[in-house]
Image (cartoon, grey):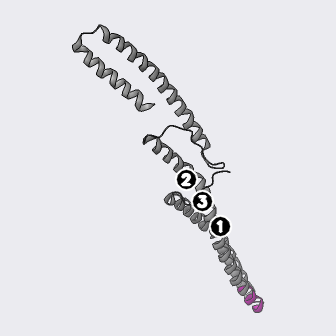
Amino acid sequence: MAYKRSILLINPKFQLKISGLVCLLAVASSLIYPWTISDLLTDFANFLQSTNPEAAKNIAAKKTNLMSFLVLWQIGFNGFIFIYFIRVTHKIAGPMFKMQNFLEEIKNGAPISKLFFRQGDAFQEVADSLNETLDVIQEERKQDFMYLSEVNSYLKNLEVVLPEDKKVVLQEINQKLSDIQNRFN
């Protein structure tokens, strides 16, 4: 079964900001057509006023009904846009949240594993790139540890021919090398 997040607002500050800005843009751009329709119907009612006052009253009443409908339509449409963009930003904020937690766990000593995002999340390529980078780092680290093991062996061989007063220093170096290897294994 696919992993599904149940919390829609993962990064509320980001998600609400983006959704609010998109809604604000939608409201600003949608004010043009009701204003234009209202102005057109008012001009037409004024034109008819002199020849057919009853038709002018009828147009004014229809204008009021139409404007009420357009206002309600815009409220509903902007509510839909807001919710839609909360979901869109969820597909962005979710992967960033997961990657942040993943890196935090590694920083706190957890073993390095693969990072996966949910299907449909944005930035799948970031997870792939991070996984490839961590694979390279782990491979380089493995090579370094192999070399440290060799150095450790060389130093132990040197310990045999060194005077006693120098063996203490060499033993400290060997201990530090072992500590480094144990910390990353």
Is 69 included in the stretch rendered in magenta? no
| Mark count | 3
Query: In the figure, 34 relative to 115: above or below?
Result: below
Please tell me which residue lies in front, 150 or 103: 150
Q: Which residues are magenta?
A: 50-60
Residue at image position (66%, 77%) is 72
Q: Which residue is mark 1?
A: 80
Residue 14, numbered circle: none
Can residue 39 be seen at all in this image of the molecule? Answer: no
**Mark 1 secondary-structure assignment:** helix
**Mark 2 secondary-structure assignment:** helix
Residue at image position (77%, 88%) is 55
Q: Earlier in the sequence, mark 3 or mark 1?
A: 3
Q: Quarter-wise, where is residue 21 in the image?
A: bottom right
Please state which amino acid type lies under the numbered disc 3: Ser
Please state which amino acid type lies under the numbered disc 2: Ala
Q: Nearer the viewer, mark 3 or mark 1?
A: 3
Please tell me which residue lies in front, 144 or 174: 174
View extreme (top): residue: 161
How far apart marks 3 and 1 lie (CA) works out to: 20 Å
Q: Earlier in the sequence, mark 3 or mark 2?
A: 3
Please state which amino acid type lies under the numbered disc 1: Phe
Secondary structure character of the magenta stretch overall: helix
Q: Earlier in the sequence, mark 1 or mark 2?
A: 1
Neighbor class of circle 2 (other Cα within 10 Å; few <14, some 14-19, many 20+) is many
Residue 150: percent from the left, percent from the top?
43, 16
**Mark 3 secondary-structure assignment:** loop
Q: Which residue is mark 2?
A: 93
Query: In the figure, 84 relative to 36: above or below?
Result: above
Q: Are marks 3 and 2 in contact (CB under 8 Å)?
A: no
Residue 6, numbered circle: 3
Residue 57: percent from the left, percent from the top?
73, 90
